[in-house]
């Protein structure tokens, strides 16, 4: 270092410090504005995410209701199907007894064919039940008539 001393006037030094502080203050203000803008954007994004989450929750609740409803309907259909299978088994045991039973079975086959042509699961349930019930009623009437005839003949 050299032994020279540099002298500045106090007024010049204070002005330089004041200008530096002013520059730093402006930079801090700009940074604060940028940070505030970014926080505003983040807040808007959170609002949109919150809205989407609400929609998803509502959709999930609706979907859950539908699944529960479908589960109940499926259980009902399964129960009816088990009953129908039991009725079909009874019809097979009594089948071939007379022409009336054959006619009922023929109608049942026609109904089953018509059912297979229908579209949609709901459209199948009622005709199957009607056909099975018709076949069962015919079988029961035939069996009862045969039993009466067999019981009355010598």
Image (cartoon, rainbow, N blue to C red):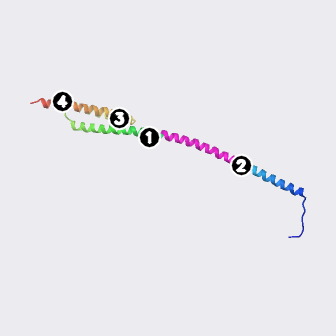
Question: Which quadrant is home to the C terminus?
Answer: top left
Mark 1–mark 2 Cα distance, whole angstroms, equals: 48 Å
Q: Which mark is residue 67?
A: 1
The residues tagged by marks 4 and 1 sit, at their Cα atoms, a distance apart of 48 Å
How many tags in the picture? 4
Identify the magenta region.
35-62
Q: Nearer the viewer, mark 3 or mark 1?
A: 1
Residue 54 on the magenta segment: yes
State the quadrant of the N terminus: bottom right
Vertical side of 90 occupied by 37: above or below: below
- Which residue is the site of mark 4? 145
- Local SS, label 2: helix
Q: Which label sits in the foreground, 3 or 2?
A: 2
Q: Nearer the viewer, residue 120 or 19?
A: 19
Determine contact: label 4, label 1, CB under 8 Å. no
| Label pair 4/2, CB-CB below 8 angstroms | no
Q: CA distance from mark 4 to mark 2?
A: 96 Å
Instruction: In this rendered view, identify the residue nearer to me: 137 or 101.
Output: 137
Of 107 and 75, which appears nearest the observer? 75
Which of the two discs, 4 and 1, labels the residue nearer the N terminus?
A: 1
Q: Residues within 10 Å of mark 3 (few under 14, many from 20)?
A: some
Q: Residue at left 54%, top 40%?
A: 55
Q: Which residue is mark 3?
A: 125
The residue sitting at 21% across, 30% down in the picture is 141
Q: Counting other residues with Cα less than 10 Å from the Cα at mark 2, is it few (<14), some (14-19), or many (20 or more)?
A: few
Mark closest to the chain's N terminus, 3 or 1: 1
- The residue that label 2 is drawn on is 34
Q: Is residue 112 visible?
A: yes
Q: Is residue 28 above or below residue 135?
A: below
| Residue 60 versus residue 108 in the image, above or below | below
Residue 115 x/y as whole percent? 34, 34
Q: Is disc 1 placed on a helix, strand or loop?
A: helix
């Amino acid at each position: 270092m050299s032994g020279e001393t540099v002298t500045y006037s106090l007024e010049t030094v204070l002005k330089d410090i004041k200008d530096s502080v002013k520059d730093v203050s402006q930079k801090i203000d700009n940074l604060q504005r940028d940070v505030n803008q970014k926080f505003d954007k983040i807040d808007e994004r959170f609002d949109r995410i919150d809205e989407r989450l609400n929609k998803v929750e509502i959709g999930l609740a609706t979907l859950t209701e539908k699944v529960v409803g479908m589960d109940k309907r499926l259980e009902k259909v399964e129960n009816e199907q088990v009953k129908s299978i039991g009725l079909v088994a009874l019809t097979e045991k009594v089948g071939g007894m007379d022409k009336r039973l054959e006619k009922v079975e023929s109608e049942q086959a026609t109904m089953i064919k018509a059912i297979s042509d229908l579209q949609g699961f709901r459209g199948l349930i009622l005709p199957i039940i009607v056909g099975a019930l018709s076949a069962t009623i015919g079988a029961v009437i035939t069996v009862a008539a045969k039993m009466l005839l067999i019981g009355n003949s010598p």
